[in-house]
Amino acid sequence: MARVVVLGAGISGHTAVLHLRRSLGKNHEIVMVTPNSKWNWIPSNIWVGVGKMSAEQVTFPLAPIYKRKGIEFHQALGTSIHPEGDKDHVKGFVTIKYTSPEKAGQEAQLEYDYLINATGPKLNFAATEGLGPDGHTVSVCTAGHAIEAAEKFQEVIAKLKAGQKQRLVIGVGHGTCTCEGAAFEYTFNVEHELVQVGVRDLAEVIYLTNEYELGDFGVGGMSFAQRGFQTNSKLWTESLFLERGVKAILQSHVSKVEAGVIHYEQLDGVKRTLDFDFAMLLPPFRGADIKAFNKAGEEITSELFAPSGFMKVDANYTPKPYEEWKAEDWPTTYQVPAFPNIFAVGIAFAPPHQISKPLTSATGTLIAPSPPRTGMPSGVMGKTAALTIIDQIKRGVNGKVHGASMANMGAACVASAGAGFTNGSAAAMTMYPVVPDYEKYPGVGRSSKDTFGEIGLAGHWIKYMLHIMFIYKAKARPFWFLIPE
Ligand SMILES: Cc1cc2nc3c(=O)[nH]c(=O)nc-3n(C[C@H](O)[C@H](O)[C@H](O)COP(=O)(O)OP(=O)(O)OC[C@H]3O[C@@H](n4cnc5c(N)ncnc54)[C@H](O)[C@@H]3O)c2cc1C
């Protein structure tokens, strides 16, 4: 009998437990520890944030699914990992703290044979003074945040209808943020809604980003072959901004937000301010606050985790300049080298470095998009770790160790530019590989055959279909496993 504990029921962790449960007999225990009672299809939070969907449409309760599947469920936060056990535990264990109303604050220790850390990002609003729902800006990172964003957006619409000019600033709230694609989507969904309700003329929409140029998206941009011509995501994105009358402020680090005023610095080192009536700025991400201890009870957090709080896995973390970055620096198995029965997948693993070229301002401020780990790679990593564990449980130490490096993996991303069955649009992009490999693909680092983009109404339909398909899959409905990650 083996016991697999997974921390975090997001895209990667939930994918992992479903595959583990499907392939391992009932004599093996699959345990999920996650703080929220509901699963959230985060990509559709964008639509909640403009009032096009309700929170119920993007979330569902996890407990009934886990009961049906025979997965042990603890609504709790993982707080510490003890990979060597301690005087009372021969095996590794995790300490958890319950968040469910009936057990809130109680602690427990769960032993494991295999552990997957899939705790995703900690939304680090604290990195920028005044950022976030407790400060002066809104967010769409959770369904709850998106509901609040939609309410504030409706207030702006009411003011526009009353003839008052409004400035809406959407983007990222720190020089090291990731997820620019989500900020881009929200920008164009907001702009689309303003047009739909007939108040676009009095609204100024500004995209505020840490990207060096439009279309970077934290992946260093993309080159596409389109209808026989070579183009790139910069040209493509710039033309969308022009067409929709959205202004962009690039190369920015937001240092502080006050009521109605954003303070930011650009690469030239000049500190500027921007007044706003509505601002949705994504926070930078950190790893979850999890500590690690050895058998003697001494803290070994820095051995397992990078200073960013993300878990160190089989990557090459040797610091080196951008010019020396290699595709093989990126992890393949997501195992922690000193403890191969521990895996970190999705946003929880520490990337070896950025993908876009990191830059510092004239005053030394880092303005460098962090590498995105979007839904598709996160799901693939969750499944990969699950397959390794399944093989090792079934075949012992000779079980196959599966791999899925982001330098050898493609990703498809459909970025909504406005919701609507007949008048919506989205930018559908695929890239291969996610992390450029300049040795294999000299010049742009990616396969021009497998990297392409298309924008239009069909993209919106695809995005909506993905919403339905991934919620179906996450609910583990019949044949869920046929839907790819
Ligand atoms: C607004 C927005 C829009 C996006 N749109 C897209 C899109 O269109 N396409 C796309 O591909 N990607 C999109 N993404 C990115 C996508 O959501 C992430 O790539 C994906 O969710 C990462 O999966 P994950 O499993 O690593 O983390 P998550 O899905 O965030 O899951 C992490 C889980 O761990 C839990 N957790 C946290 N701390 C602990 C702890 N201590 N113990 C136990 N559990 C813990 C969390 O509650 C959560 O359930 C978007 C992201 C945002 C914010």
Image (tube, rainbow, N blue to C red):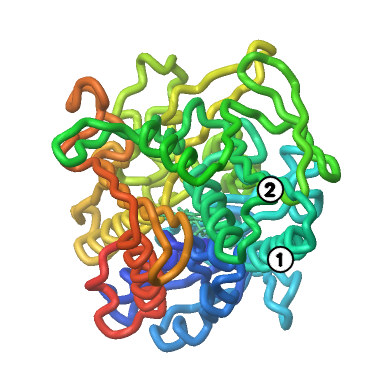
Image quarter for residue 362? top right
Residue 381 visible in the picture: no
Label 2: few (<14), some or many (≥20) within 10 Å?
Answer: many
Q: Which mark is residue 376?
A: none
Label 1: few (<14), some or many (≥20) within 10 Å?
Answer: some
Residue 464's spot in the image, x, y percent? 39, 69
Q: How many marks?
A: 2
Name the side, left or right, on which 410 lies relative to 317: left
Name the side, left or right, on which 255 lies relative to 205: right
Q: Is residue 98 above or below residue 168?
A: below
Q: Secondary structure at mark 2?
A: strand
- Which kind of residue does numbered mark 1 sit on? Gln
- Residue drawn at the location 44% of the way across and 79% of the way down: 71
- Residue drawn at the location 61% of the way across and 58% of the way down: 140
Image quarter for residue 443? top left
Q: Which mark is residue 154?
A: 1
Name the N-terminal-most of marks 2 and 1: 1
Residue 22's spot in the image, x, y percent? 29, 76
**Which quadrant is home to the N terminus?**
bottom left
Q: Secondary structure at mark 1?
A: helix
Q: Is residue 5 above or below residue 117?
A: below
Residue 289's spot in the image, x, y percent? 65, 49
Q: Is residue 218 above or below residue 55?
A: above
Q: Is residue 342 above or below residue 267?
A: below
Circle 2 residue: 168
Residue 185 visible in the picture: yes
* Frontmost residue, 160 versus 391: 160
- Which kind of residue does numbered mark 2 sit on? Leu
Image quarter for residue 17? bottom left
